[in-house]
Amino acid sequence: MASSQPREWTGLQQFPVATQNALHTLLGKLRNEDVKSLTVLVLGKGGVGKSSTVNSLVGERVAVVSAFQSETMRTVLCSRVRAGFTLNIIDTPGLVEGLFVNDHALDTIRRSLLNKTIDVMIYVDRLDGYRVDNLDRQVVRAIARSFGPQIWKVGMVALTHAQLSPPDGISYADFVARRSAALLETIQKEVGFKKGDPEIPVALIENSGRCSTNSGGEKVLPDGTVWLPKLVEHIVDIATSSVPAVPIDKKLIDGPNANKRGKMFVPIIFLLQYLLVIKPMQMLIKYDMHNESENGPPWEKLSKRETEVAEK
Ligand code: GDP
Ligand code: MG
């Protein structure tokens, strides 16, 4: 994994003053809870805006953004420090290859995160998608399979391209509500969320440089919401909730009881081998020996029959 040494979070100063103030308030909340570092993992299909979202969050160009399928399949860890607090944010390659989930990419991501602990997972998709299809369901399941279903308990959904005009006859709020509900329903169903499991928050994002701004120069959505502090608020809420962070350890990567895997089947395999192979062979041999002693060896029988045929 490409990773840089933790650097001072200078990107914070690029934000408009009001955004900076909002972010400082949120960082203060983390300080109060004694949270000194956060590790945020960004996942999703290719081209949905993962790298752009990482750049928007950090306020610097730390991840490569590509309008067309990117060649890079690397996971990138970016660390920024501000007043004793460290933000680690991990950008990842897309999880889909052709029409299928790229399990190899997922495994590579997972291995590159060995010994890290994920505080928050951001699942990125586009707001302007009009349906949740089978591939989305596969991706959601694959994430749960790779990182354990609990990764979704520290998960949130980020919907990019949020500066959109909804189709005629539907308001922006309705469009957002329906798109969010469709995705959340899929995630909860595929991951097997139960009553009492945390709600997955949804953040709206507009990474484009053409995003509208308010009078303070802050980037706003069509409904006037300043989206960056909202996104950070969700991250902080998850990090300070009672849901435990997800460690990426050897056990997760190799699977539970990797050494013991299959060993319980050894006696059963021996027994089956004895009953299905050794025992029938022994019985056949015994049967043959018995026949032989009664009728003589088979070649004698053959030569007797041959003689009979010759005599005829
Ligand atoms: P990734 O493959 O998920 O990392 O996606 P990228 O961040 O590389 O973005 C793919 C393309 O979508 C790039 O051309 C970005 O400029 C564009 N893009 C990403 N997020 C947004 C967004 O919120 N709004 C708009 N209009 N374009 C975006
Ligand atoms: Mg990318």
Image: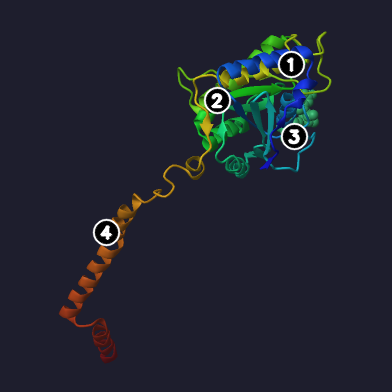
The three-letter code of the residue at mark 2 reads: Val
Q: Secondary structure at mark 2?
A: helix
Question: Mark 4 packing: few (<14 Cα in 10 Å), some, or many (20+)?
Answer: few
Q: CA distance from mark 4 to mark 1?
A: 74 Å
Residue with the mark numbered 1: 20
Among numbered discs 1 and 2, the one appearing first in the sequence: 1
Q: Please report the residue visible at 71 percent of the width from the left and 29 percent of the height from the top.
A: 54
Say if mark 1 contacts mark 2, CB within 8 Å. Answer: no
Question: Mark 2 packing: few (<14 Cα in 10 Å), some, or many (20+)?
Answer: many
Q: Is residue 38 left or right of residue 273?
A: right
Q: Is residue 303 left or right of residue 17?
A: left
Label disc, if present, on residue 114 of the rendered structure: none
Residue 53 picture location, percent across and down: 72, 26
Among numbered discs 3 and 4, the one appearing first in the sequence: 3
Say if mark 4 contacts mark 1, CB within 8 Å. Answer: no
Which of the pair 63/179 is nearer the observer? Answer: 63
- Residue behind label 3 places its C-beta within 8 angstroms of ligand 2: yes
